[in-house]
Image (spheres, helix red, strand yellow):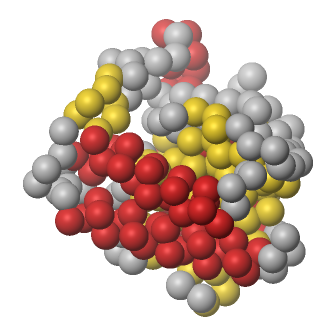
Amino acid sequence: MNLQIVQNLAINSAKKSGKMLLDNLENIKIVKFKDRQDIATNFDYESERIIVNAIRKKFPGHNINTEESGIIKGKSDYTWVIDPLDGTKYYIRKVPLFCISIALQYKNETIFGLVYNPSTKEMFCAKKGDGAYLNDKKIKVSNQKNLEDAFIYVELPNPNISRNEFNKYSKFFTNLNWRSYRIRVFGSGPLGLCYVALGAFEAYVNLGNPTGMYDLAAGLIILKEAGGKIADLKGNLIKLKDHKKSLFILASNGKIHNKILKLLKF
């Protein structure tokens, strides 16, 4: 597989989808309530249609796994993992923290990832073994070793988990907030992972809800290629083949990883 062809297709379809999303900010309609907090709009589905059609035209035999439509089976060892609009709640409120996430897996291992914020034109990309890039400029994680000087990106607990888990993760959030330099809560998994890859944050910690791999696949390879470390909240390393799981994630520059784990009380 020529991953440059893959990257070109992903970039072009993400840009086309992103332009459509921005052009339709006044025409958004909620068309589905997945649960009390998770929604989909008409343009989640239109973004998905644009990306899926581009893939099926170029790679008609590939499998496709999308957040909205689920699995479209092909006859291939390649599977595209797509979140056509991450941050839908931001999108309907015109907050520029929504993005498009596209990844390609070969036999369940992610070999390419792209995360695109159409509002800021930030295009994060990574190919396996080739490093991570923001708008064609190579990026890497920060060298910060001190937790007290670290910026941490956190996904807060939400009511989709049990009350006991909510209280447990809320306590950890308080400990981490006390020990670190600053915590910021933006609520976008793909962008959070990419900002750790960029070195803007030292760690991304998901305390909110187990996250599906359509949200994480692209961001995880971008972070890994930038030199980051990925684990669950018990410290078990996450391999890029572990995409059938929904996970609480700790992703970091690797230098403050164990210091964060020591604050966890599981």
Side of 235 where 155 appears, left or right = left
Front-most of residues 51 and 59: 59
Side of 48 where 228 appears, left or right = right
Q: Residue 66 placed where, x, y %?
A: 57, 42
Task: Looking at this view, name the residue that lies furthest to the top.
Answer: 163
Q: Residue 151 placed where, x, y %?
A: 53, 61
Residue at figure coordinates x 36%, y 50% from the top left: 46
Q: Residue 64 placed where, x, y %?
A: 65, 46
Quarter the C terminus occupies: top right
The answer to whether residue 66 is above or below residue 253 is above
Quarter the N terminus occupies: bottom right
Front-most of residues 1 and 182: 1
Please state the total of marks drawn on the protein image. 0
Q: Quadrant of residue 118?
A: bottom left
The answer to whether residue 170 is above or below residue 102 is above
Q: Residue 79 placed where, x, y %?
A: 74, 49
Residue 251 in view of the camera: no
Task: Looking at this view, name the residue that lies furthest to the bottom.
Answer: 137
Q: Quadrant of residue 152?
A: bottom right
Residue at figure coordinates x 49%, y 10% from the top left: 163
